[in-house]
Image (spheres, rainbow, N blue to C red):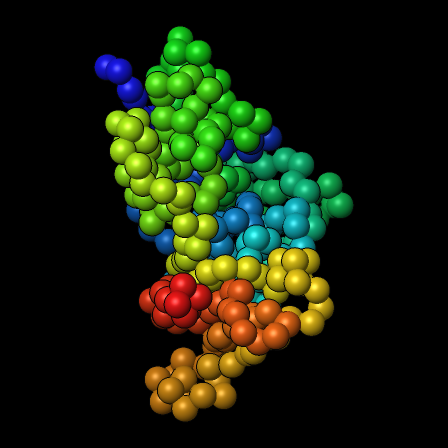
């Protein structure tokens, strides 16, 4: 063919010190093969997949412990949202252990998976989920034969045209890395195909909402408070509304949530909208439309 588009998705990253056996120590794909809910589960990681699975299993009655090297999970999101998420997770009975570096993970051969951290912390659980991110699914493609190679993050590098270092090969979706959202990947695939065929599509919008289907849900579009302060200074205008303070939240019984809107110092332009709570991923498009108008 004259042009190719690689859109083969991603596979779980497997750290060398985590002996994933898909029976007691799972990755984010094999966790779905469990035939029963364990009494306890350790989740390694603080990203989207780790947060979603950890909160879902905890809501189902599994005793879940999340371990990650960062202070809070979902570090790319607004700090108020992640703090709310951790509070809700712990209120459900979960345990968050931040700023921990995992040294070893092992199945004791009987009934427990033992996780040891470099500070001496030991966590025991019936099962363990390793959610250490994902890498490009190209292991069987032999991309080196086409002059391609993976970057330091295990993904295929592309430019703004979704073109790889080989001019007639394009790539889209999880195989090129973040944001790794279905909405973004669909648009990337369309654009990669158009670019390969010489069809003008214009620049891709930077305003793609993100949705995280944890309990509670989290969604965002535009800048976080931290990003807005960096670009516009400390004079930015921030508005917050807690679900528990609003009649709709009280009537629906959804009190655990928050809407946050970030504006420029003049209060004339919305820079970002952040939502945490049930239905957050269904509401964020309203914020997106307000930002586009």
Position of residue 185 relative to residue 80, above or below, is above
What residue lies at 53% left-to-right and 25% top-to-bottom? 151
Where residue 240 appears, as percent x and y from the top left, is 55, 78
Asked which quadrant contains residue 117, the reply is top right
Residue ranking furthest to the top: 145
Q: Who is closer to the viewer here, 284 or 89?
A: 284
Where residue 200 appears, as percent x and y from the top left, is 30, 36
Residue ranking furthest to the left: 1
Residue ranking furthest to the right: 119
Where residue 19 appears, as percent x and y from the top left, is 52, 30
Asked which quadrant contains residue 255, the reply is bottom left
What residue lies at 40% left-to-right and 8% top-to-bottom? 145
What residue lies at 43% left-to-right and 24% top-to-bottom? 164
Residue 128 visible from this viewpoint? yes
Q: Is residue 161 left or right of residue 270?
A: left
Residue 7 visible from this viewpoint? no
Q: Who is closer to the viewer here, 136 or 146?
A: 146
Position of residue 208 relative to residue 14, above or below, is below
Position of residue 246 relative to residue 153, above or below, is below
Q: Is residue 92 left or right of residue 254?
A: right
Q: Who is closer to the viewer here, 81 or 227?
A: 227
């Amino acid at each position: 063919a004259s042009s190719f588009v690689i859109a083969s998705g991603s596979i779980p990253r497997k750290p060398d010190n985590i002996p994933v056996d898909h029976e007691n120590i799972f990755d984010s794909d094999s966790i779905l093969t469990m035939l029963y809910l364990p009494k306890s589960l350790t989740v390694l990681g603080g990203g989207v997949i780790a947060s979603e699975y950890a909160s879902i299993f905890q809501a189902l009655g599994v005793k879940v412990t999340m371990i990650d090297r960062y202070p809070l999970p979902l570090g790319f999101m607004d700090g108020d949202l992640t703090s709310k998420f951790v509070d809700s997770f712990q209120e459900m009975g979960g345990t968050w252990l931040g700023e921990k570096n995992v040294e070893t993970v092992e199945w004791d051969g009987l009934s427990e998976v033992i996780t040891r951290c470099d500070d001496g912390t030991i966590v025991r659980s019936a099962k363990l989920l390793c959610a250490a991110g994902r890498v490009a699914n190209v292991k069987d493609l032999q991309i080196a034969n086409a002059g391609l190679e993976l970057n330091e993050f295990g993904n295929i590098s592309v430019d703004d045209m979704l073109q790889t270092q080989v001019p007639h090969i394009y790539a889209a979706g999880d195989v090129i890395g973040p944001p790794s959202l279905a909405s973004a990947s669909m648009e990337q695939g369309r654009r990669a195909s158009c670019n390969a065929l010489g069809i003008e599509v214009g620049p891709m919008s930077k305003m793609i909402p993100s949705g995280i289907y944890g309990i509670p849900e989290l969604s965002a579009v535009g800048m976080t408070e931290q990003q807005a302060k960096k670009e516009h200074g400390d004079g930015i205008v921030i508005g917050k509304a807690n679900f528990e303070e609003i009649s709709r939240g009280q009537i629906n019984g959804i009190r655990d949530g928050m809407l946050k809107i970030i504006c420029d110092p003049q209060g004339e332009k919305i820079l970002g909208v952040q939502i945490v709570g049930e239905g957050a991923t269904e509401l964020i498009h309203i914020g997106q439309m307000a930002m586009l108008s």
